[in-house]
Image: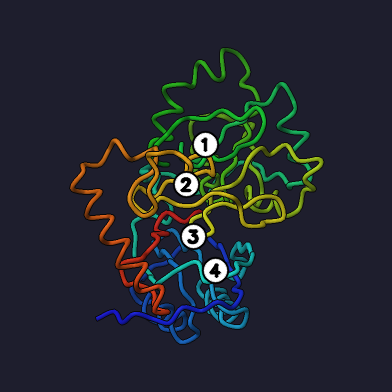
Amino acid sequence: MNIPHRLSHDPVTVAALYRFTRFDDCAALRDPLDRMCRDYGVRGTLLLAREGINGTIAGTPEGVAAVLSHIRALPDCAEVDVKLSSAATMPFHRMKVRLKREIVTMGEPDIDPRASVGTYVDPQDWNALIADPGTIVIDTRNDYEVAVGTFERAIDPKTASFRDFPAWFRQERERLLGEGKPPKVAMFCTGGIRCEKSTAFLKQEGIDEVYHLKGGILKYLETVPEETSLWRGECFVFDQRVTVGHGLVEGSHSLCFCCRRPVSPEGRRSPLYEEGVSCPACHGERTAQQRASARERHRQEALASRRGLAHVGAVLSAADADG
């Protein structure tokens, strides 16, 4: 049984991480990792699959450091990619270590980023690449993420999930690349993990000049000054901060807890927005009965919060965390 836990208001460290490697027995890795996280009060979601590890966790600096040390001791994880930031309050309600078929779902079983990926481009060199007219820039994230912010000149595939990306590219390939020598293709995502797979996919499709942003948008926003940045808007993250901006400061969006889409300040002023019930994007997708049920659930969560407890149902899923 899950027991409501006391809310903490101390600043916390957030670690987004991933590593493509080979785990022969994920089940054997799960329980020790889960136990380590709980022993140190770390929360979030970690995904384990035969192809590696991915997730976002949060806790005290000491707790996160202990869990990262444990992860670095896993097979071939000494060089795990980690991006650290901070949050004013704990952005997760629970700790989950899940076993999955893929650490980021693309649905292309023959893709192996360990065998072949695109060329990494450091954040300080990214502007020159994507400003080049001879470069096609593709945002590999989901449509609701792109709506919050993206790079100048970036193409939005308008995909609902990363699984849709291969079909989109195959359908649009001729229009995007034309005939003759293919142009350079630069791709990016939040933390880099989706680009590991998408560049490996394009290489398998016969595209040679494929590039991706090292460390993802998060590393770019952390290291590139806003005055020289080609990023426009905010970046969606898979925790209760919802979005971050330059310097990884918390953004202006909130989350609709019914559809899990980000809601801008303008969206919160819409008559279709009701906290915990609906937002302009999902109001028409839900029946009056569903909205009434959500309204009662939100009321119960608000009561629990006023008592200093986190309601057990108040969970933000990070299963698609981008690492």
Q: Earlier in the sequence, mark 3 or mark 1?
A: 1
The circle on residue 147 is 1
Q: Nearer the viewer, mark 3 or mark 2?
A: 2
Report which quarter residue 62 is drawn in: bottom right
Amino acid found under the numbered disc labelled 1: Ala
- Whole-angstrom CA distance, mark 3 to mark 2, is 11 Å
Amino acid found under the numbered disc labelled 4: Asp
| SS at badge 4 | loop
Q: Nearer the viewer, mark 4 or mark 1?
A: 1
Circle 4 residues within 10 Å: few <14, some 14–19, many ≥20: some
Residue extending farthest bottom: 39
300 above or below 175?
A: below
Circle 2 residues within 10 Å: few <14, some 14–19, many ≥20: many
Q: Give yes or no for contact between labels 1 and 2 (Cβ–Cβ under 8 Å).
A: yes
39 above or below 59?
A: below
Q: Nearer the viewer, mark 4 or mark 2?
A: 2
Amino acid found under the numbered disc labelled 3: Asp
Q: Earlier in the sequence, mark 3 or mark 4?
A: 4
Would residue 254 be found to the left or right of residue 317 on screen? right
- Whole-angstrom CA distance, mark 3 to mark 4, is 27 Å
Q: Earlier in the sequence, mark 4 or mark 2?
A: 4
